[in-house]
Amino acid sequence: MIFRGDSSPRTAQLDAGGQRDARGTQEPAGQPAAKGSGLLFALATLACVAGIAASYYFFVRTTTGQYIDESALVEAGELHGPAGRATTRFLDLLPGISLAIAAVVVLFVTLARRRWTAAGITVAACAAANLATQLLKDWFPDRPFTGIQTLELNSLPSGHTTLAASAAAAVFLVASPRWRPLAGFLGGSFAVAAGVSTLVNQWHRPADVVAGFLVTGAVMLPAGWLIMRTGNRWNVWGGHREHWASSRLWLMLSVLAGLISAGVAVYSLLRIAPFGLGIPGLSQEESTTNYFWAGVSLIVITGYLGTVTATWLFGHAARRRN
């Protein structure tokens, strides 16, 4: 038997799975990542792709979908006063804001934590998501005429939404697991605000915004899985009580926003449903802003659903701290 001269409990811990970080400090060995997480990432990515196809087919190719989507866009004009001017200013600044936030956070984390691989994957994924949006916008056929008066040029997916959502996703990917619940909520809120602004300003229909979210998810989820695989050392999750930024509060706020929006959507659609769907005291009415609020709700629900899903999925896939 050959004994190594550096044998010690500290060395044994390294041999058992502990690793040193880039500064030479010891990273305690943790439990391995959850089994089957790769399959969950794949299923979530496929769900995003299926969602893009479904959004395009229903809201662009069918008469009912075109009518709902276009009505929300037209009714947005009812609110195009002070709100319109505010969103116009926000949208003008959005590209710069998105790039600045993503660049500052990614650069800071990369330099401070030396997560070079994660940064490279994240930047490439952001570029791919925005390129995919532009290619899909050109590749999808123009809107067919189905009796609905609307611009026939295809506007799905929304480029502004993809830019905001991919910038938020970039921050989420490079953040440590303890910071991801907070980063997810703030980033999701930023992306939702950008999407709603494009509708209020009548730049995009609700389906365009939803498709922008889904394109971002379809590209950034595989990138996130790759980061989890290559950054196993620092992707260690200590649970929701580990840090204030890990609190379940951020997930609860996202869920609450989604539930409130679902309620608004149901109420708005019931007000414009034929004969109130037979509900006593509820009769069909001509919409003034019901389609608009239903469209806003669809944007909010999709944005925060993505936030909750990503936060749970990445927490599930990370190594557990002993």
Image: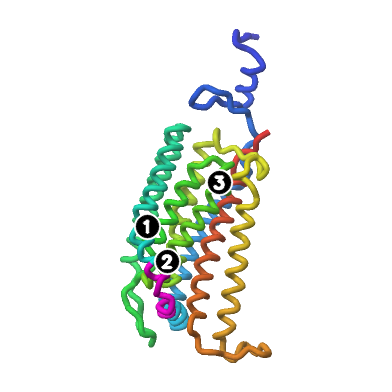
Q: Which class describes the residues within 10 Å of circle 1: few (<14), some (14-19), or many (20+)?
A: some
Q: Amino acid at mark 3?
A: Arg
Give the main secondary structure of the magenta stretch: helix
* Mark positioned earlier in the residue sequence (3 or 1): 1
Q: Is residue 110 above or below residue 278?
A: above
In the image, which residues are magenta? 73-85
Residue closer to the observer: 130 or 253: 253
Can you tell which of label 3 and label 2 is closer to the viewer? 2
- Quadrant where the N terminus is found in the figure: top right
Q: Which residue occupies 59% across, 58% down?
A: 254
Asked if residue 41 shows in the view, the reply is yes
Instruction: Please give left or right for residue 217 compared with residue 255 in the image.
Output: left
Q: Which residue is mark 3?
A: 180
Alpha carbon separation for disc pair 3 and 2: 25 Å
- Secondary structure under badge 2? helix
Q: How is the image coloured?
A: rainbow
Q: Which residue is mark 2?
A: 197
Tell me whether the residue at label 1 lies in contact with that at label 2, contact meaning CB atoms closer than 8 angstroms: yes
Instruction: Please give left or right for residue 13 compared with residue 157 in the image.
Output: right
Q: Which residue is mark 1?
A: 94
- Secondary structure under badge 1? helix
Can you tell which of label 3 and label 1 is closer to the viewer? 1
